[in-house]
Amino acid sequence: MTTPGSTTTAKVRKDLAAGFDVAKARQDFPILREKVQGKPLVYFDNAATSQKPQVVIDTVHEFLATYNSNIHRGVHQLSERGTEAYEQSRKKVQRFINAAESREVIFVRGTTEAINLVANSYGRQHIRAGDEIVISAMEHHSNIVPWQILCEQTGAVLRVMPISDAGEMLIDKYEKLLTSRTRLVAVVHVSNALGTINPVHEIIRLARRQGVPVLVDGAQAVPHLKVDVHELDCDFYAFSGHKVFGPTGIGVLYGKAELLEAMPPYQGGGDMIKSVSFEKTVYNDLPYKFEAGTPHIAGVIGLGAAIDYVNGVGLDRIATYEHGLLEYATEALSAIPSIRIIGTAEEKVSLISFVLDGVHAHDVGTILDHDGVAIRAGHHCTMPLMQRFGVPATARASLAFYNTKEEIDVLVRAIHKAIEMFG
Ligand code: 7TS
């Protein structure tokens, strides 16, 4: 790729002018120096999982190599250091999403577990037969199935907000779904299959008017946008560490303290108790009440390093740069005659889902892989959304701030190859 100072192109100069040096950012990610099929890796599967900067890799390594220990229980040096680093990460997350208190940050395995926690704990406590839960037509399975399980168990009913052909939530239809029976709204902030940035602020405001709590699935939002749970005034916010340049197996459930306080534990075991006898167990305070057993300590510490890293780059700069990538990619892909872009909302992150006439998404993925281009092909765990658009699957290129316009050119050339072979 082009590096500043060598063959600096006009495009790179523009990016630098925007205050973001992509060549420098790329140096932070060792995997971007890898070759795939003998070609430089073009990693466009960031919505599935993003790549890790060296500092995250080093931070996890340092923990495992020099102070690996269990937390919250040892009196020895290593355990104290581990506990300190673990709790520092909680504070980093708190500041990152602007939560009022660090005890509102619960470490879980990922977005999926965060939503299941709310469904199992808050849901079983508050939701009864005939009650309604509102989701949208563009939810990831992890924000559909936990609510369906809850509905099966309680006799509650799932209601689905429809979306437009562009892939935007229909807010007027949503307003009509909010009734005296609505007990919870659970919506995705940014769609993983369309890229749509949803008006969650408005969705929350309308629900709040009726006293209905709102859970936001932020899995695809936190790597691209500045998220402020205080400003959003959401009740729950879920995200995964591995999509925001941190390790897999770690994620966050943010919840308002008063809600979390009143909720029963999700899992029982060590660390989530104050005292246990066979007659009575007294549960621990927040956040520990929801963190039973030994947590993913290395993951939490690694997530803290990822957040420091993202803050260092700056989410504003990330969003500006990625917007340029989105515009460039949208224009380049739209010029391909047999392409249909699925998801053409006004507000989008740098993600493009598409189908090609007569070429199955999986074949597109395979041909692209031969050129070192990693995309995802399939239903993206959004089968009802695929049905909504009348397609079995899409090919999806999801870009991060370390991607470049030159890489988009490689993608376009590879798509032309796929059309020649299959189209
Ligand atoms: N919600 C959204 C919007 C997602 O995109 C994903 C994962 C999840 C929830 C679940 O996150 P997890 O970390 O608990 O698995 N999305 C994708 C994807 O688009 N491709 O692979 C995983």
Image: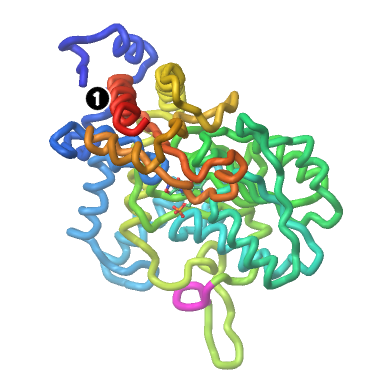
Disc 1 Cβ-to-ligand 1 distance below 8 Å: no
User: Would you say residue 74 is visible in this rendering?
Assistant: yes
On screen, 118 above or below 101? below
Examine the rendering and report whether any part of residue 307 can be seen. Answer: no
Q: Label 1 neighbourhood size at 10 Å, few (<14), some (14-19), many (20+)?
A: few
Query: Which residue is situated farthest in the bottom direction here?
Result: 278
364 in relation to 387, above or below: above
Three-letter amino acid code of the residue under disc 1: Lys
Residue occupying the point 37% across, 55% down: 300
Describe the colour scheme in one phrase: rainbow
The image quadrant of residue 85 is bottom left
Q: Is residue 416 one of those drawn in magenta?
A: no
Q: Where is residue 334 in the image (x, y as percent from the top left)?
A: 46, 20
Residue furthest to the left in view is: 38
* Residue designated by label 1: 24
* x 46%, y 60%: residue: 108
Q: In which quarter of the image is the C terminus?
A: top left
Q: Classify residue 184 as left or right of residue 320.
A: right
Circle 1 SS class:
helix
Please give the range of residues in magenta: 267-273
Give the dominant element type of the magenta stretch: helix, strand or loop: loop
Total of numbered circles in the picture?
A: 1
Camera-side residue of 199 and 283: 199
